[in-house]
Image: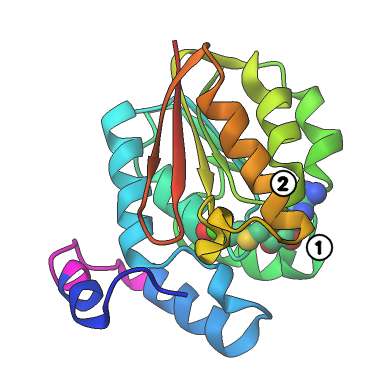
């Protein structure tokens, strides 16, 4: 479901910085060759991630849910000199494709791309994180939030995607993923350790800044 009427969505797109050529190619390839291409961020959300990252100039970004690498490349655009982005995905079938894209983006040495289950991987991170983008399986959003929270520096930002879940988030009789996202949103807004806002961009992005 799209929240914005087509003409407004087209206007927003037309007044947002253009999509870099490699990201256009990744979006094209993903739609033509990969299952579930709707999961890809797209240009408006991609430019938002890039802008947030450029404003923060993070030294360490953590992304949970790489898919075809689109959002990782957007986020990496704002890294501080010498900074790095760690991204993890459980789907090993996309590995060669994604490594190729990171290489073409000139980000091979900047992006630490891991294949595996984020639930097992996150406890092994020992560095201070500036910016987190949670975008993997919705069922585990709360676990991801709790697993990374103490590693995020004060003033750091946790973003979580798809928190409006095509509008299903306001329904009462619903499925497992929707309920998990409802519990996640409720937990974040009740968490006194953060200032949060639910940004209604595309499918909804929860933004939580650690105090
Ligand atoms: N961030 C991407 C889209 C991510 S789609 C973009 O915006 O372009 C969600 C991804 O989460 C899928 O590729 C899926 O394989 C991955 N995923 C699902 N469960 C996971 C888990 N337990 N650990 C790591 N990745 C997982
Ligand atoms: Ca997403």
Q: From this viewpoint, which residue is outermost toward the bottom?
A: 32
Tell me which label, 1 or 2, sits earlier in the chain. Answer: 1
- In the image, residue 45 sits, relative to residue 40, either above or below, namely above
Q: From this viewpoint, which residue is outermost toward the right?
A: 120
Q: Quadrant of residue 32?
A: bottom right
- In the image, residue 33 sits, relative to residue 108, either above or below, namely below
Q: Which mark is residue 151?
A: none
Judging by the rendered image, the residue that carries numbered circle 2 is: 180
Is residue 11 a member of the stretch shown in magenta? no
Between the residue at mark 1 and the residue at mark 2, the CA separation in whole angstroms equals 25 Å
Q: SS of the residue at dot 1?
A: helix
Quarter of the image that includes the C terminus? top left
Task: Choose between 171 and 183: the one closer to the eye.
Answer: 171
Q: How many marks?
A: 2
Crowding at mark 1 (Cα within 10 Å: few <14, some 14-19, many 20+): few
Instruction: Identify the magenta region.
Output: 12-22
Nearer to us of marks 1 and 2 is 2
Judging by the rendered image, the residue that carries numbered circle 1 is: 92
Q: SS of the residue at dot 2?
A: helix
x and y percentages locating residue 134 in the rendered image: 59, 42
Compared across the picture, whether 81 is left or right of 28 comes to left
- In the image, residue 160 sits, relative to residue 46, either above or below, namely above
In percent of the image, x 57 and y 55: which residue is there? 169
Compared across the picture, whether 47 is left or right of 108 comes to left
Task: Choose between 32 and 197: the one closer to the eye.
Answer: 197
In percent of the image, x 52 and y 12: which residue is there? 192
Quarter of the render that holds ligand 2: bottom right
Crowding at mark 2 (Cα within 10 Å: few <14, some 14-19, many 20+): some
In percent of the image, x 57 and y 62: which residue is there? 168
x and y percentages locating residue 165 in the rendered image: 56, 60
x and y percentages locating residue 200 in the rendered image: 36, 52
């Amino acid at each position: 479901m799209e929240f914005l009427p087509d003409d407004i969505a087209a206007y927003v797109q037309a007044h947002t910085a253009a999509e870099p050529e490699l990201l256009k190619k990744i979006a094209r390839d993903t739609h033509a060759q990969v299952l579930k291409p709707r999961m890809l961020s797209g240009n408006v959300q991609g430019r938002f991630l890039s802008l947030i990252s450029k404003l923060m100039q993070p030294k360490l970004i953590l992304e949970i849910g790489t898919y075809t690498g689109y959002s990782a490349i957007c986020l990496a655009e704002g890294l501080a000199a010498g900074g790095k982005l760690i991204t993890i995905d459980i789907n090993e079938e996309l590995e060669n494709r994604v490594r190729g894209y990171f290489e073409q983006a000139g980000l091979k040495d900047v992006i630490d791309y891991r294949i595996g289950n984020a639930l097992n991987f996150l406890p092994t991170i020992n560095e201070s994180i500036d910016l987190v983008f949670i975008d993997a399986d919705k069922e585990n959003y709360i676990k991801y939030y709790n697993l990374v929270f103490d590693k995020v520096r004060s003033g750091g930002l946790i973003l979580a995607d798809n928190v409006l879940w095509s509008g299903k988030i306001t329904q009462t009789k619903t499925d497992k993923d929707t309920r998990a996202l409802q519990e996640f949103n409720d937990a974040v807004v009740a968490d006194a350790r953060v200032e949060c806002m639910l940004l209604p961009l595309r499918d909804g992005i929860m933004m939580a800044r650690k105090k």
